Image (cartoon, coloured by chain):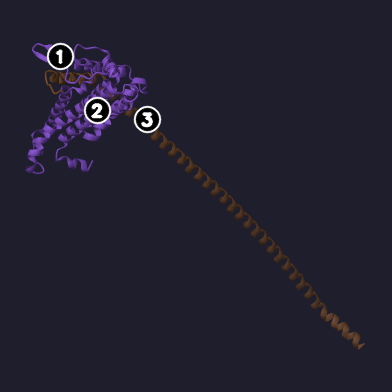
């Protein structure tokens, strides 16, 4: 059972030769293939990640643009509304002023007429009182 | 009694331990049966390797897929024992150890070698011959010495007196026990497995040996794995040394 002979070194040499053959036939080409596949998967994954990031960035950008546009529209509406308000206020004030002026003018006219009438009446007072006196004395 | 004689007369159930089919090369004697099965195993491995790498595709299928699975298994095994930086150069050696022993063991269990008559001795797994296992174990010893000297130079020999010179005899003894245990473990397991199956077939030739045969297949695979793992461990250990802990700490 334990007889050692030339089988031992020859087996060792055979094994080394087998290692060399399998290295050339199996480990090198298949290892290369495994590494290449790893590389391929890694680059693809990387690209996919980059694309995903780009897409996310684009979506974010659009979102921001949308938000800013909405804000601009809001501002425009606000501005238009404020302007309209201003114009309306100004017109109301103007109309009120015009009415006021008309009112004052009419008031002045009335006052003037009153004055004139009063003056005229005052002028008649002397003659009327004389007539009254004459009538009473007569 | 005649029944037993009948069974022993059948070619399947005959035990021959210690008989060898000798070839004479010059004035050297070699065990021919070991070489015949070894060439058979090598032919299987080379054929499988050739078939797997003949047309390499990005999406593997068939034999390429199988051999890639084996290669990845070997790579993981080597990487776990030697670390990320060093393992690549040793994948061929450890991988061939594993594949060769594995196919040897299984060929002994699965191929009906008994059908081929030899003038003397019998065909069996090459790993049940002590010459084969000692050859492989000595190669492992050479490999780890080579790995250690290559990686660490003469500082490799400080492992004998580190951490303390008290352990020097044990450290030296280790260099002898490593190949001894490697070769005898493999040799003993495979030979014992074949003997148990042989004896059981001799006693009860139907169905009863089947569970033992299945167990033998399992043991054979485990032994191949153990041999390859230990070889990788020894090589990794030799390269790491006692200064290697720092490297491991921050990796």
Q: Which residue is mark 3?
A: A44
Q: Secondary structure at mark 2?
A: helix
Q: Which residue is mark 1?
A: B22
Q: Is residue A86 toward the left or the right of residue A105 in the image?
A: left
Residue B114 visible? The answer is: yes
Are dots 2 and 3 in contact, CB under 8 Å? no
Residue displayed at 68% across by 64% down: A100
In terms of depth relative to the viewer, which is nearer, A15 or B59?
A15
Point out the frontmost of discs 2 and 3.
Answer: 2
- Subunit of mark 2? B
Point out the frontmost of discs 1 and 2.
Answer: 1
- Above or below, B25 against B146 in this view is above
Q: Which of the chains is brown? A: A
Q: Is residue B173 toward the left or the right of residue A83 in the image?
A: left
Q: Which residue is mark 2?
A: B224
On the image, which quarter does residue B99 sit in? top left
Q: Position of residue B100 (x, y in %)?
A: 23, 22
Residue displayed at 16% across by 20% down: B18
Q: Residues within 10 Å of mark 1 (few under 14, many from 20)?
A: some
Q: Position of residue B238 (x, y in %)?
A: 15, 34
In terms of depth relative to the viewer, which is nearer, A12 or B117?
B117
């Amino acid at each position: 059972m334990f007889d050692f002979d030339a089988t031992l070194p020859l087996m060792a040499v055979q094994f080394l030769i087998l290692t060399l053959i399998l290295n050339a036939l199996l480990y090198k080409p298949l290892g290369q293939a495994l590494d290449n596949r790893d590389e391929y998967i890694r680059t693809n994954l990387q690209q996919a990640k980059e694309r995903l990031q780009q897409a996310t960035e684009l979506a974010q950008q659009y979102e921001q643009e949308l938000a800013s546009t909405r804000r601009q529209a809001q501002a425009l509406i606000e501005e238009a509304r404020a302007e309209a308000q201003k114009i309306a206020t100004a017109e109301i004030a103007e109309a009120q002023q015009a009415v006021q002026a008309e009112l004052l003018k009419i008031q002045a006219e009335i006052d003037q007429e009153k004055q004139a009438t009063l003056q005229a009446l005052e002028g008649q007072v002397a003659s009327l009182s004389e007539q009254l006196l004459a009538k009473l004395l007569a | 009694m005649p029944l037993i004689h009948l069974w022993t007369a059948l070619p399947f159930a005959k035990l021959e331990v210690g008989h060898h089919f000798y070839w004479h090369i010059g004035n050297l004697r070699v065990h021919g049966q070991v070489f015949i099965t070894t060439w058979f195993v090598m032919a299987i491995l080379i054929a499988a390797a050739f078939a797997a790498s003949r047309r390499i595709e990005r999406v593997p299928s068939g034999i390429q897929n199988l051999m890639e699975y084996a290669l990845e298994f070997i790579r993981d095994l080597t990487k776990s024992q030697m670390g990320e930086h060093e393992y690549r150069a040793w994948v061929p050696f450890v991988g061939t150890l594993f594949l060769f022993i594995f196919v040897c063991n299984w060929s002994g269990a699965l191929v009906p070698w008994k059908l081929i008559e030899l003038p003397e001795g019998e065909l069996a797994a090459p790993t049940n011959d002590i010459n084969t296992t000692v050859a492989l174990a000595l190669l492992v010893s050479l490999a780890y010495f080579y790995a250690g000297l290559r990686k660490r130079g003469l500082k490799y020999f400080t492992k004998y007196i580190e951490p303390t010179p008290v352990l020097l005899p044990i450290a030296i003894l280790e260099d002898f026990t490593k190949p001894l245990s490697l070769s005898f473990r493999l040799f003993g397991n495979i030979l014992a497995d074949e003997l148990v199956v042989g004896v059981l077939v001799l006693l009860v030739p139907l169905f009863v040996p089947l569970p033992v045969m299945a167990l033998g297949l399992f043991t054979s695979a485990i032994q191949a794995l153990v041999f390859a793992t230990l070889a990788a461990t020894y090589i990794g250990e030799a390269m790491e040394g006692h200064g290697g802990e720092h490297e491991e700490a921050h990796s």
